């Protein structure tokens, strides 16, 4: 797999851990040495691995934890750091997210996440363009 | 200056170009070779330098362009890539942003920006904690 694929795979692991409420998987996929930060929708910034993990423990253990599915992810690799832009389908609506990854010991690990509201939707959710009319006038 | 300071200086240049509606400065500070993307508040993702610059031309030339001031910026450097988390003061309220920079020819240039709503505020805007009482009982 090339780096784009590996980064998208790491991004998918994040949403899998989120949707399965798997705190061990969530802890495994965040960076050990690179800085760790997180901006949950509407929140301020959490900085330090400890603060971010505490927030995930709270979110994933809540009975109100939302179901989140990733759509339309695109990876942008810059050497040993990459960012992914993707939609998050949450309760029938969409958020849009930036996820940053750093390569540590050959593994792409998450260093930052920000999600917020969007008026846009993934390409597959948009209505197909109207068929051009075959009438000349 | 160390990398943290240089990245914060590049971040400040972004908000200066924004508030002064300086499209030439805005074009100068975005990456030439690294990927360029941008998620304006509520928008979908713009991808490619051309799409992002077209959006800035529209925003900066509008008579309704909001006044934006950066507050509480913090830089996180990972080799030749860095991200900044900061508040954006806009019309008396706050947004929170992630700005990603890449070092190109020794210069930190912007590769991605996402801003969205937050319920938080910069430290200097928060009320000071109540003084502990000196009364023992």
Image: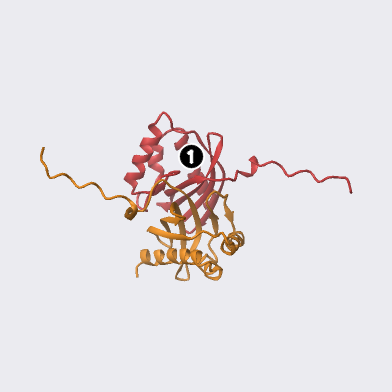
Chain colours: A red, B orange
Side of A136 where B120 appears, left or right: left
Number of other residues with Cα within 10 Å of mark 1, as a class: few under 14, some 14 to 19, many 20 or more? some
Q: In which image quadrant can residue A51 be found?
A: top left
Q: Is residue B87 above or below residue B130?
A: below
From the top left corner, tell me how far across and down residue B110 is, in percent.
Answer: 49, 62
Dividing the picture into quadrants, the one containing residue A23 is top left
- The residue carrying mark 1 is A15
Residue sitting at x 76%, y 43%: A130
Residue drawn where x is 45% and y is 32% of the image: A20
Q: Position of residue B19 (x, y in %)?
A: 49, 64
> In this picture, is B120 found above or below B20?
above
Q: Position of residue B18 (x, y in %)?
A: 50, 64
Residue B6's spot in the image, x, y percent?
39, 67
Q: Please tell me which residue lies in front, B78 or B134.
A: B134
Using the rendered image of the protein, determine whether residue B126 is visible from the camera's viewpoint. yes
Give the number of callouts. 1
- Taking the view exactly as shown, the residue that stands out farthest to the left is B136
Question: Is B96 on the left-hand or right-hand side of B123?
Answer: right
In the image, residue A87 above or below residue B46: above
| Extreme-top residue of the structure | A63
The chain to which mark 1 is attached is A
- Given residues B23 and B75, the one toward you in this image is B23
Tell me if I can see residue A1 in this picture.
Answer: no
B103 or B91, which lies in front? B91
Residue A24, above or below A105: above
Q: Secondary structure at mark 1?
A: helix
């Amino acid at each position: 797999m090339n780096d784009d694929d590996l980064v998208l795979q790491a991004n998918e692991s994040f949403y899998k851990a989120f949707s399965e409420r798997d705190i061990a998987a969530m802890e495994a996929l965040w960076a050990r040495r690179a800085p760790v930060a997180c901006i949950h929708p509407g929140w301020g910034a959490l900085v330090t691995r400890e603060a971010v993990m505490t927030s995930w423990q709270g979110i994933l253990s809540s009975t109100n934890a939302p179901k989140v599915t990733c759509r339309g992810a695109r990876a942008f690799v810059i050497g040993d750091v990459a960012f992914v832009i993707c939609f998050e389908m949450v309760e029938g609506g969409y958020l849009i997210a930036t996820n940053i990854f750093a390569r540590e010991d050959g593994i792409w690990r998450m260093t930052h996440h920000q999600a917020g509201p969007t008026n846009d939707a993934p390409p597959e959710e948009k209505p197909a363009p109207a068929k051009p009319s075959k009438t000349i006038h």
